[in-house]
Image (tube, rainbow, N blue to C red):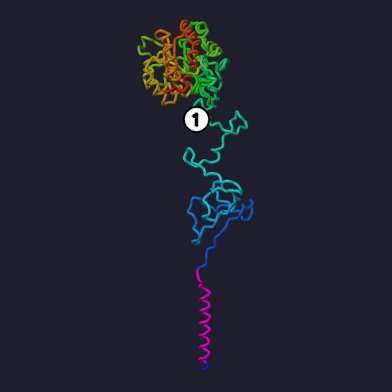
Amino acid sequence: MKALTVASGILFWTLVIGVTALIFLSGPEPAEVVQIDTAPSAPPAAGSPSSIGLPPGFSVTGPAMAPARPGPPVARQPNAPTLAPPAARQPNAPTLAPPGQDTNMVPTAPGQVPAPPALPGRSGALEDEGENVAAVPSSAPGASTPDPNTPDADTPGPSASAPKVALASLVPGIDRSTDEPLPEAPQPTVVEESPYGPLPKVAEDGSRPSDVYARPSDYAAVEGGPPRVAVLLNGLGVPGAADGDIIKGLPPPVSLAYGAYGRGLQERVTKVRTAGHEVFLAIPLEPNNYPSTDPGPHALLTTLPPKDNIKRLQWAMSRYAGYIGVTNYMGAKFQSDLGSVAPVFEELKRRGLLYLAGGSTDGSVTDRVATALELEYEVADVQLDDGRMDRQLAKLEAAAKENGTAIGVAKAAPGTVKRIADWAGSLERKGLVLVPVSAAVRTPRQG
């Protein structure tokens, strides 16, 4: 009997202890995951214990963290800081706002209005801070406001670095952009020695002979202003000819072309450049009726291999310095032969020269090659001495009014020079302006 009583007691207390343990261990529901309910009312000071950085590999574009249990969203605190993108996040950035409270990722300070989100740039990517800060031009120290009319630095061509010109200063008449003599030639930076003599080259800083030796003009590479007319007189540098007497009285913007066969060519070129005229080199090219018409012993021929034509071209280029480009002396057959033109134009491009075709022959081949090589190139619009001079000058004026610019070429002769000088004096009342050929080549054409 006593043993039964003891066993009953043990069973009773075992049940009591088991039920109690089951109640405490199971609980009414699972434990909750604790979430931060509010953010600090103001950003903590840099370096404070509550200041944190982004963990390695964190991405603001990843999936949002869900709250531990459904419930009403926590109210946004007025001055709560928010998360910045990884690229702008600082090591001691303000504490993160709780997940789901805000989608603005820009840190804000009390009373500060958040900046608008970044917009895609020209490349399609978000623009960084550097793209929105204008560079201070070296010519204007301390400048802080960018000029919206300034072309991009990547824009190729002379206009990228050219100073701005007020359209009001672009008046009809004769281009008076400079009264200074043109710089001496040769300029050491754009000259290299060769077995034939000095040859033009592009300088180490990118300067080209076509820029260095050109007559400065406010009308070059500028849209607007009066229509431009330009004139190139060729046939100069002929042995025994008195060039100085022929061109006396010409306005300085008239450009001159000297051949390669005369004597004392550098002295002649230096003299006319001192008077303000820019110069072209006239190279002898094969005509249609060669050899009945012979442009000389160093003419470039379609029957020669390219390397021999380049040697002849370099011989001609070494006769003097100071020219901005090349024009043709004869050359109807040569300029229509693709295999002959391409190596020559490539050499001119490499040496920083431009090319003006006289306009007496079909320019389809030269046009195509120059475009492919991105060679500065133009074709004369009017042969001024091909018929009555007055009629040809009227054609030149009409072409300029239609296209914005036009170029005429003529052989230098006393009667021609006088007529051009008289005509130049009438341009102001006609609303036209006489510019150097280089300015006409670089002026955008209309239509």
Asked if one can make out residue 134 in the rendered structure from this viewpoint, the answer is: yes
Amino acid type shown at disc 1: Thr
Towards the viewer: 147 or 77? 77
| Residue 8 magenta-highlighted | yes
- Picture coordinates of residue 237, whole percent (x, y): 48, 10
- Picture coordinates of residue 122, whole percent (x, y): 48, 37
The mark tally for this picture is: 1
Using the rendered view, name the quadrant where residue 182 is placed.
top right
Secondary structure mostly seen in magenta is: helix
Towards the viewer: 167 or 283? 167
Residue designated by label 1: 155
Q: Secondary structure at mark 1?
A: loop
| On-image quarter of the C terminus | top left
- Picture coordinates of residue 95, whole percent (x, y): 59, 53
- Range of residues picked out in magenta: 3-29
| Residue 246 magenta-highlighted | no
Towards the viewer: 293 or 44? 44
- Give the residue at x 55% y 56%: 75
- Picture coordinates of residue 111, whole percent (x, y): 61, 48
Asked if one can make out residue 299 in the rendered structure from this viewpoint, the answer is: no
Left-right relation of 41 to 269: right
- Give the residue at x 36% y 9%: 292
Farthest-out residue, bottom: 1
Towards the viewer: 216 or 96? 96
Pointer 1: residues within 10 angstroms few (<14), some, or many (20+)?
A: few
